[in-house]
Structure formats: structure tokens, C-alpha cells
Amino acid sequence: MKPVKVGICGLGTVGSGSFNILLNNAEEITRRVGRSIVIEQIGARRDNDTCDISGINITRDIFDVVNNPEIDIVLELIGGTTIAKKLVLTAIENGKHVVTANKALIAEHGNEIFAKAQEKGVMVAFEAAVAGGIPIIKTLREGLSANRIEWLAGIINGTGNFILTEMSEKKRNFDDVLAEAQALGYAEADPTFDVEGIDAAHKLTILASIAFGIPLQFEKTYTEGISRITAEDVAFAGQLGYAIKHLGIARRTKQGIELRVHPTLISKKQLLANVNGVMNAIMVQGDVVGPTLTYGAGAGALPTGSSVVADVIDVARTLTADPTNRVPHLAFQANALSDVEILPVEEIECGFFLNMTIQDRAGVLANITQILSLNDISIESLIQQEREGSDLVPLVVMTHDVKERNMNAAISAIEALPDVAGTVQRIRVENLA
């Protein structure tokens, strides 16, 4: 069979990793596919010292790649959502299959892109868009296809996980660890996408669509970052037997789908609580299989490149297959996606960790517990510690499950008390049993 010809757009971290895997593992890949996969052309603004591109057609105009009639599969590895979207849609219009690692593109424009791909009978593969080298999309879309997925919860941003791990293990504050993460290259100069949860929200949007057979709805994903987490929060959580993790959570309920990214307390007995550093992990609960956990490197040239090349192999294997018999982009047939409601965060029900500073005087605790009671909130545990030389003391309250709207009302009332200083720190608690 004639070789499958690939065009690579972008030769940065993921592009270079994918390039080197295609070259270094060419023999193994050929054995798997049944024919060779060759790099026909690269579109990149600059070369990459980690890649030996001698003898390969290089262009500085990435649109040369998608307009090259020799190319079968385009690898979109430039990132962003503006030029990348135009590039992908042009490739599809030209009848080319696409492999991408671009989570923002898929989360925000995937519905349009997949509809165009279906119209043209081509595939858009995006395993590398979520959790780097972990094959979580294939797991959800194919490996667990016999299951009705009940919920999933994941550490899907390595930067945030590194920061929270350092804060927990070394008792460091957020700003200090963020500066180190930037120095190590784990965090960008502008870390907003990572620490404020936007990156994780893109990924969760994709996972939830595949898990539940719903359209991509990034704009409805509740998103909260970790920049307000303090060393004191981490220490108190530890005393109570919990770790704080930045989780993406998608859950099917009778009322609708929960879709949320936020800091979360989970029991230290949970496997997910012990995933540390820059590693990623995703728990999935299926009605048949029960709980599963996938773990691995969530970023980097070779781990992410591994997923990119795996997609290239999948596409190459099915080039001649009837498009109607291929695995659907979002796991369910396009005309069978559900319009089930995405629940507003006010309707979510979970436990809460509240950390506040109060005046150390009689009656203050009674006022707080009365407010909680009036909002149908029951207390699970409580910590009140003395501070030497100060009449202000920390109070930590753990609650049983309650609707978020009730908790919002209670927090507003507590913050209005004259004996409560500043704001109440609220972190949600999840039982992932």
C-alpha cells in the first residue's frame, strides 16, 4: 500500500515531539498500520534544534501544508483558536483528515468543526487535547463504550497540581510556588489559563461531551482557580484528613449534568488525592465497570506527541473505511447527542470547607452555627484555634452536603456579622466513592 503522507503545522514542543516519534518509531508504526507514514511537509515559523529536518520540505506558510494535494493527514499543532480554526476548516474543506492537540479549539469550536468534518467525510482526532499522554479520550469513547458513565473527576492541569503539591508537602505559599513553577517552565509568564482553571475547563468540556453524549458547551462550565488557596487552608484540610486538589468534575444527575472546575477537598485515602507534582489522573465511574483510574504525564513533547502519533495511526488505519462506520468524534452518533441541561453551579450539592477569622469572644460561634442552621446546613466537624497575642482566631467548619445556593446565602450572612473579619474562604468537598 502507498505511504500515508503527513503534514505538520507547528514545530514547537508538541510538534517537535510528534516529529521525532514519527521518525524514531517509524518501523514500529509501519508494522502497526500496514504501510509507512511519512512526513511530506512541515509548516513552521522557525526550525527546532531538537529535530533533524534535513531533506524535508519546509514552508513558513502553514496554509501551504493544508493546500498541498499530496498530504493525507494534517497535524494542527500551532495552538490558539483563530488561525488554528481557519487552518483546520481549510484542511477539512480540502478533504484532509486532521489531528490536533488543541483543547481550546475543540472545546470552543468543536461542534462546528465536527459538523464540517462529517459533511466532508473526514476525521478529526484530538486525543492529545486532554491529559497529554494519557489515552483518556480513547478510554471513554471506545474502552468504556459499554457503560453508562455516571461521573468523572480529574486532575487535568499539571501546573495547578504542582503548585498544590508543593504547598502541601513543603508548607509554602501560593505566590512562592507559582514563581518556581514559572522558573521551571511548568507555568507561563501569564499563568492565568492554568491557575484560574481555564485550561482544565477546556479539557473537562471535551471529556464530559464524550462521557455523556452532549454537545461541547465550554461556556456553561463553571470555572474557579486556585489563586485564593492559602497555606493555612492546606494545613487545616490536612488536619481533617483531606488533600486540596484542583479538579474537573462532570456528573450525571436526575436534574442535569454538573460541569465544574474548582479547588476541591478529597479524602487522603482516595487514589486521586495522592497524584502529585505535574502528573495528571482521571477517575471515571461506569455503571458496569465501576471506578477506573488513568494516570500519567499530562504534558511535554514526548508524552503529548505519543497521543498525537497514536491518532495519526488510528486515522491511517481507517483511511479507506466507510465514514459512517468510523467511531464518532464525540463517541455518540452526531444525531443522537442529548440536549440534557447543564446545571448552574447554584444547584450543585456537595459538602463545604469554610475557613474564616473571627473575634475570640462568647456568642460568636453560636451566631455562625445559627446562620448555618437557618440555611439547612449541618456541621460535620469544626476546628477553632487560639492565636497568641491576638483576639482574632481562625475557625474552620466542615459541612455535610448542601446546595450551593444555601451556602451562598449563609456565607453572605456570616460575612455581615461584626465579629467576622474579612471574607469566608469556601472550598467544596467531594466524596469520590
Image (cartoon, rainbow, N blue to C red):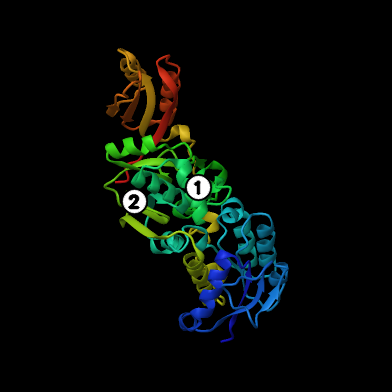
Q: Residue furthest front?
A: 389
219 or 238, which lies in front? 238
Q: Residue furthest bottom?
A: 1
Residue 360 x/y as whole percent: 33, 17
Give the structural element (helix, strand or loop) at label 2.
helix
Query: Which residue in the structure is indicated by mark 2?
Result: 272
Q: Amino acid at mark 2?
A: Leu
When the figure is inspected, residue 160 is found, relative to residue 390, above or below; the finding is below
When the figure is inspected, residue 135 is found, relative to residue 112, above or below; the finding is below
Mark 2 and mark 1 lie on one chain; the one further toward the N terminus is: 1
Residue 184 x/y as whole percent: 49, 56
Query: Which residue in the structure is indicated by mark 1?
Result: 179
- Judge left or right: residue 380 versus residue 265: left
| Numbered disc in front, either 2 or 1 | 1
Q: Amino acid at mark 1?
A: Ala
Residue 304 x/y as whole percent: 50, 64
Q: Quadrant of the N terminus?
A: bottom right
Q: Quadrant of residue 141?
A: bottom left
Q: Is residue 318 visible?
A: no
Q: Quadrant of residue 171?
A: top left
Q: Is residue 306 visible?
A: yes
411 or 374, which lies in front? 411
Q: CA distance from mark 2 to mark 1?
A: 25 Å
Q: Quadrant of residue 401?
A: top left
